[in-house]
Image: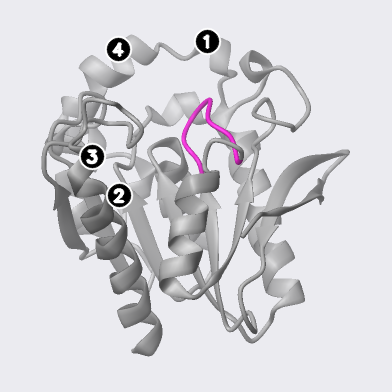
Amino acid sequence: MNGQAFTIPCPGYHIAADWYENGYNKEIVLILPGYTSSKKRYADFVKNVTQKSGASALVVDYSGHGESPFELDDTSPAQHFLEVIYAFDWLRTRYPKANISVIGTSYGGFHAAHLAKYRNFKSLVLRTPAMYQPADFYSIQARIDREYTTSVFRKNTKAIMEHPLFAQPTMFTGSTLLVVHERDEDVPTQTTDIYAKAFDAEVYIAKGFKHSTNNPKNPQSGLAEYYDAITQWLRKSSAE
């Protein structure tokens, strides 16, 4: 199954997206990639998810990523989150009766968690969800200190708990799966533990995995179990 390329309108521009049609579109997954990644790099992941879960899927390129416009350093997390809103609303408008699930990875997980504050949907999968300082949400990417964010901020439990994303209880009423990579060098347990508590999430630990699923040092024998854990959970969630 290959994705059908098209664009989604945003204020003053369009972002690139791929649509993977699978059946009657009763179950749809919105897939939000990580920072600097693209829908092209997520093709194998999307195919695994759609084939194993039976759902259709939409995967996007944020501005500055893949086939979408602008230079990455000139974009901001706030701009990308607005694009996520437009992508979700595009799905909801066209498939009003569908059960929509959202899978966000790292930077995409950060946006998926925010989306749960503003839109209703069936279920949420947070794969190694990242965390950023509140002020960085409106900063252009070129001014974000990623070394400090990774090595200091994401290990500061108090600061993370005070982040606007967690300062108030989430109003998301769907079910959540948190995927933790055991050897994650970018998103430590201080971050993922707070996500787990805030979203009352079921937790799956990918043994031996580093932050990127494509890291060649990951146990390749564990990939099948990894995909099965996500897709079986999606099927179970859709049946509830």
| Residue type, numbered disc 3 | Gln
- Magenta residues: mostly which secondary structure? loop
Residue bearing the label numbered 3: 220
Residue 114 seen by the camera: no
Residue bearing the label numbered 1: 143
Instruction: Give how far apart the Cα atoms at labels 3 and 1 are.
Output: 36 Å
In what element is the residue under mark 3?
A: helix
Examine the image and state in which quarter residue 79 appears.
top right
Q: Is residue 156 magenta?
A: no
Residue bearing the label numbered 2: 166
| Residue type, numbered disc 2 | Phe
Instruction: Give how far apart the Cα atoms at labels 1 and 2 are.
Output: 24 Å
Above or below, comparing residue 45 to residue 145 in the picture: below
Q: Earlier in the sequence, mark 1 or mark 2?
A: 1
Instruction: Give how far apart the Cα atoms at labels 4 and 1 are.
Output: 12 Å
In what element is the residue under mark 4?
A: helix
Closer to the camera in the image, 103 or 84: 103
- CB contact under 8 Å: marks 2 and 4: no
Q: Which residues are drawn in magenta?
A: 33-39
Examine the image and state in which quarter residue 72 appears.
top right
Image side of residue 213 versus residue 101, left or right: left
Closer to the camera in the image, 44 or 101: 44
Residue located 49% across and 29% down the image:
35
Closer to the camera in the image, 167 or 202: 202
Instruction: Give how far apart the Cα atoms at labels 2 and 4 are.
Output: 20 Å
Q: Is residue 36 magenta?
A: yes
The quadrant the C terminus occupies is bottom left
Examine the image and state in which quarter residue 20 appears.
bottom right
Instruction: Give how far apart the Cα atoms at labels 3 and 4 are.
Output: 31 Å
| Residue type, numbered disc 1 | Arg
